[in-house]
Amino acid sequence: MKNKIAHSIATAQMKKHRRPLLLAAAALALLPAVRSDAAMIAWDTPTLITADANVSTTGSLLYAYTFGATGVASATVNGVTFAPFEVSNNGSSPETVGSTTLSAGFTFFSTNTGLGAATGAFAALSSAYQGLLKSGVSLFGGDQFNLSLGGLTSGVTYIVQIWANESTEFKNDLPSNGVTQVVPGNFTLLDINNTNATGGVGQWVTGTFIADSTDQYVAISGSAAPDLNAVMVRSVPEPSTYAMLLGGVAGLFFLRRRRKMS
């Protein structure tokens, strides 16, 4: 009971710092500063969270993380395992897992259960997907995460997928939906609760980029303190690589056929 009360107080404190969703024209002014050395990312249209199949299986998995507080559990959704990325609640130091680093100029709010709900569209998701989305990280009074995705190979094409969800009842306290903005690349807004009520769900988005170094910088901000539940990076073959693979398969088929005929 004490833990639940403490979590409620902490979450309520976080929400006091949230601001209403701004009109699109005004929101453009909120674009975070982006490092000049960051490759541009072509973001697709954000999509409502609906089912396990939301998790991409295109290409080859490089890594996938589920964000949360100390002790956050891994989650396997659509055959993809998201490893724990622990972020110290009330901490402000950069957190690094593997080759990925999350940093911010404000205090982190992290939770392992506080972004889920026992009703609505969220409750209709698989238990594994709920596990992935009920944990996450936000900011006390701040509005920008800096996410550095490492372990990349220059010249290789990658897909990055990001989830922003907050189904908690505290969403009812907001005058308007919170958002998570993602750059660099085309301006992308993720609605973190589609009903602005308990049980609503957020969105996910994928972006494609060609690495120009061993790491890729992503700024995550918003007209309200952003939410970040999970991230995944996958490498994808270039069209020319597909052509070479298909050509190789066709060549093997042709040789085998000739041998059978001779």
Image: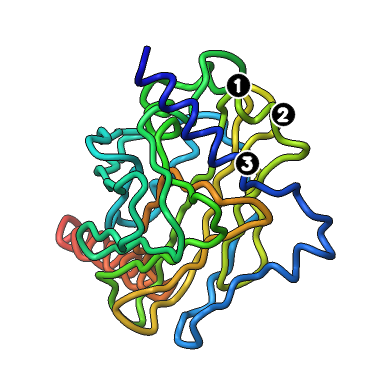
Amino acid type, mark 2: Thr
**Residue 112's quadrant in the figure?**
top left
Task: Locate the C terminus by quadrant.
Answer: bottom left
Q: Position of residue 224 (x, y in %)?
A: 64, 51
Residue at 50%, 39% in the rendered image: 54
Residue under label 2: 195
- SS assignment at label 2: loop
Q: Are marks 1 and 2 in contact (CB under 8 Å)?
A: yes
Under circle 1, the secondary element is loop
Q: Quadrant of residue 246?
A: bottom left
Residue at 59 percent of width and 63 percent of height: 43
Q: Disc 1 designates what residue?
A: 199
Q: Is residue 173 above or below residue 165?
A: above
> Is tag 1's residue or tag 3's residue first in the polypeptide sequence?
3
The circle drawn on residue 16 is 3
Question: What's the CA distance linking mark 1 and mark 2?
Answer: 8 Å
| In this view, the mark in front (1 or 3) | 3
